[in-house]
Amino acid sequence: MVLGGWWRAALRCTSGAGLYIRWKQGHLRVGNGFWRGSFHGPVGPRGSSQPSSASNPITELDKADAWLLRKAHETGFLSWFRNGLLSTGIGVISYVQSDMGREAAYGFFILGGICVTYGSASYLVSLFILRRTMMLSLATTALNATAVLSVALFWLCAISLYIGRLEVEIVHDDEPEDESSDDDYGGGGGKSEK
């Protein structure tokens, strides 16, 4: 099994025990690039301590990479938001189906809220952390953050209004009918007048 042996050898070289053995044998020094998080040595080109971006202009490949990262980032947010909307929609449908569905609907509303909140929060945090990597200006970052926050707030407003309407219907359905209300409207309520 050649492939299994190769994977086993690669795992052995990169595992903690393999690194320790290589360090003990003198093949791996603590000061080399691996322990600093880079196999390429110093930060800049040819051993200089300046960052490589200071001496190299931004290429079309860098711009394409930034665009792809931006689109992958937006796709992650849209996926979480779609799952939140789907869960909310299932909650609405389950509410109108039966009494048992009414109890399950609140669980779906909570699940939808978790998806929308996590998706929005992770998008905003990643947006500000990766702003320079995605080559976004501060104005574009603020616009994207405003759009995400407004969409999440629109969802929150819609679900709050719907749940508020549900609470009004539930309270209205649970109230017993008053017999005295029939008297007020001339129904008589079965009493005879003398």
Image (cartoon, helix red, strand yellow):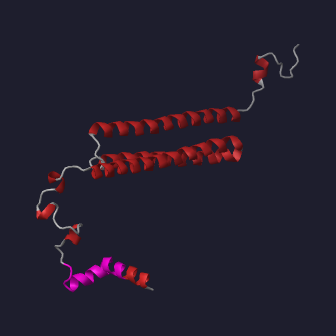
Can you tell which quarter of the image residue 184 is in? top right
Indicate whether residue 20 is drawn in magenta: yes
Residue drawn at (23%, 67%) of the image:
38
Residue drawn at (28%, 51%) of the image:
62
Residue 89 in picture, x, y percent from top left: 60, 43
Residue 26 in picture, x, y percent from top left: 19, 84
Residue drawn at (65%, 42%) of the image:
93
Q: Quadrant of the image for the N terminus?
A: bottom left
Residue 21 in picture, x, y percent from top left: 26, 84
Residue that lies at the very extreme toward the front in this rendered image: 60
Nearer-the-camera pick, 191 or 55: 55
Residue 40 in picture, x, y percent from top left: 20, 67
Query: How would you classify the magenta stretch by its main secondary structure?
Result: helix
- Look at the image and give the residue range highlighted in magenta: 9-28
* In this view, 181 is above or below 169: above
Q: Quadrant of the image for the C terminus?
A: top right
Can you tell which quarter of the image residue 175 is in? top right
Nearer-the-camera pick, 49 or 163: 49
Nearer-the-camera pick, 66 or 28: 66
In the visual, does 106 lie left or right of 57? Answer: right
Indicate whether residue 179 is drawn in magenta: no
